[in-house]
Image (cartoon, rainbow, N blue to C red):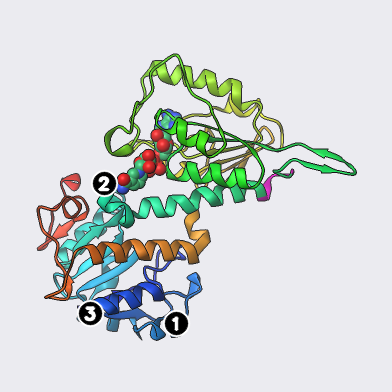
């Protein structure tokens, strides 16, 4: 099977869907890999490195010709895929709900589009989960971004000129990104606290050396819930949470927000009035910005100032770590192809009754087939 790796064209996209390591592994599986010239440039991978790993380098038209699978990071405009054979797999982060017209375009072109962000949260799929791998890096980068605009140092420092006190850093939403934000804040010497609605996170927060801040008088989500995701909380819980946050946030210097509810707008966790209680110079990084934001006044992709506090509306922070985010993303794609690889046909075999295939397959045989796109 020929596997094509596209050079990304989405505005701001820096990542690449392959790295030399995954090219080598795909070749070892028996695939032929064709990388579009310049595909790795922004992720610090040269064409020569791809070639040395066993790929051929060619134009978009030539990599697509005869391809059985096309790997990408962001969804490509279907108009740019002319020449791809009918039945070819298109594997990447395809943003199906927002790019619905393009999904129809992939169907019309006869492609089998596979949206990797719809990977189910099951143990077997963990190594293929692009949301986790990219969120992890985003959680790290959120703290670095906050530290770089914050006018104070994060660790406590005792100097001849006096003592600098440790920064108080609060993480709201302790999923994959939040856990990494806690770990990064701790490594930088901040005094870290964190909150979530899932009570299972309490121990995780403690095990990273941070202080859990939880609503105690109203029940949260016990255990992991459905697939480990949160749901919308009751008005009673929301009120108790707002009161808890009000008391805590006035003492915080940096706040990292990561709270998301799948398929819903992000929960609003910080109001403008609460921001006004923070010390001037404080920094809030809202990783939920693109989903509407956890913070009142957030603007996705921009930094704004309210009451002397900088609010960074973070959007796709993993892109700013292009080499590492490409490496993890590429390995997610390789792990997926490898898990379904059929040795006899030297190509992936995707059984229609497989839970993973059902969740991520968007189009097949000229039609949109995913029930979420009904
Ligand atoms: P997410 O990005 O959907 O949400 C981030 C966090 O925000 C979650 O922890 C959520 O509980 C929290 N949140 C939602 N509403 C909130 C509110 N009102 N206040 C405070 N916090 C709120 O979550 P995620 O990072 O994708 O991970 C969620 C869970 O899924 C984790 O336990 C993770 O380990 C698990 N997971 C499992 C797999 C797998 O098994 N394959 C893969 C990835 C993640």
Instruction: Please identify, in this view, whether the residue under mark 1 or under mark 2 is nearer the observer.
Output: 2
Q: Are the residues flagged by discs 1 and 2 in contact, CB closer than 8 Å?
A: no
Q: List x then y, in percent, for residue 90.
A: 24, 66
Q: Range of the magenta residues?
A: 148-152
Magenta: main secondary structure:
loop
Quarter of the figure with residue 105: bottom left
Residue labelled 2 has its Cβ within 8 Å of some atom of ligand 1: yes
Question: Considering only order in the chain, which callout, 3 or 1, is on the residue closer to the N terminus?
Answer: 3
Instruction: Please identify, in this view, whether the residue under mark 1 or under mark 3 is nearer the observer.
Output: 3
The crowd level at tag 1 (other Cα within 10 Å; few <14, some 14-19, many 20+) is some
Q: List x then y, in percent, for residue 224.
A: 33, 33
Quarter of the figure with residue 334: bottom left
Reply yes or no: does residue 151 show up in magenta: yes
Residue at numbered disc 1: 49
Residue at numbered disc 2: 122
- Whole-Å distance between the Cαs marked 1 and 2? 34 Å
The crowd level at tag 2 (other Cα within 10 Å; few <14, some 14-19, many 20+) is few
Secondary-structure class at tag 1: helix
Q: In this view, does 301 lie above or below 295?
A: below
Q: Is residue 27 left or right of residue 279?
A: left
Q: List x then y, in percent, for residue 368.
A: 15, 55
Reply yes or no: does residue 156 show up in magenta: no
Of residue 145 and residue 349, the one placed in the foreground of this image is 349
Secondary-structure class at tag 3: loop
Secondary-structure class at tag 2: loop
User: Can you tell which mark lies on residue 30?
Assistant: 3
Of residue 70 and residue 84, the one placed in the foreground of this image is 70
């Amino acid at each position: 099977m020929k596997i094509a790796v596209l050079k990304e064209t989405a505005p701001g996209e820096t990542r690449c869907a392959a790295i030399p390591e995954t090219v080598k592994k795909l070749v070892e599986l028996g695939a032929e890999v064709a990388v579009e010239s310049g595909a790795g440039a922004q992720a610090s991978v040269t064409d020569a490195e791809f070639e040395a790993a066993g790929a051929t380098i060619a134009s978009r038209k030539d990599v697509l010709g005869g391809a059985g699978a096309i790997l990408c990071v962001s969804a490509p405009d279907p108009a740019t895929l002319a020449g791809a054979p009918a039945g070819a797999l298109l594997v990447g982060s395809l943003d199906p709900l927002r790019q619905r017209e393009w999904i129809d375009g992939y169907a019309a072109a006869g492609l089998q589009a596979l949206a990797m962000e719809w990977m189910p949260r099951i143990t077997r799929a963990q190594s293929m989960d692009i949301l986790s791998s990219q969120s992890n890096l985003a959680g790290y980068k959120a703290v670095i971004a906050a530290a770089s605009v914050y006018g104070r140092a994060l660790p406590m420092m005792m100097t001849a000129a006096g003592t600098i006190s440790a920064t108080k850093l609060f993480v709201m939403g302790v999923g994959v990104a939040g856990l990494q934000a806690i770990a990064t804040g701790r490594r930088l010497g901040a005094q870290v606290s964190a909150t979530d609605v899932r009570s299972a996170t309490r121990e995780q927060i403690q095990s990273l050396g941070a202080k859990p801040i939880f609503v105690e008088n109203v029940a949260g989500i016990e255990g992991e819930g459905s697939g480990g995701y949160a749901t919308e909380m009751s008005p009673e819980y929301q009120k108790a949470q707002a009161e808890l946050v009000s008391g805590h946030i006035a003492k915080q210097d940096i706040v990292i927000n990561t709270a998301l509810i799948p398929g819903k707008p992000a929960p609003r966790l910080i109001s403008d009035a609460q921001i006004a209680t923070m010390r001037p110079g404080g920094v809030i990084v809202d990783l939920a910005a693109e989903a509407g934001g956890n913070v009142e006044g957030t603007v996705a992709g921009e930094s704004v100032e309210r009451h002397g506090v900088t609010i960074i509306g973070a959007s796709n922070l993993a892109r700013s770590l292009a080499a590492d985010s490409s490496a993890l993303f590429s390995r997610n794609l390789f792990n997926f192809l490898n898990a379904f690889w059929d040795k006899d046909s030297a190509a992936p075999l995707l059984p229609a009754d497989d839970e993973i295939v059902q969740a991520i397959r968007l189009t097949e045989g000229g039609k949109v087939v995913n029930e979420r796109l009904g």
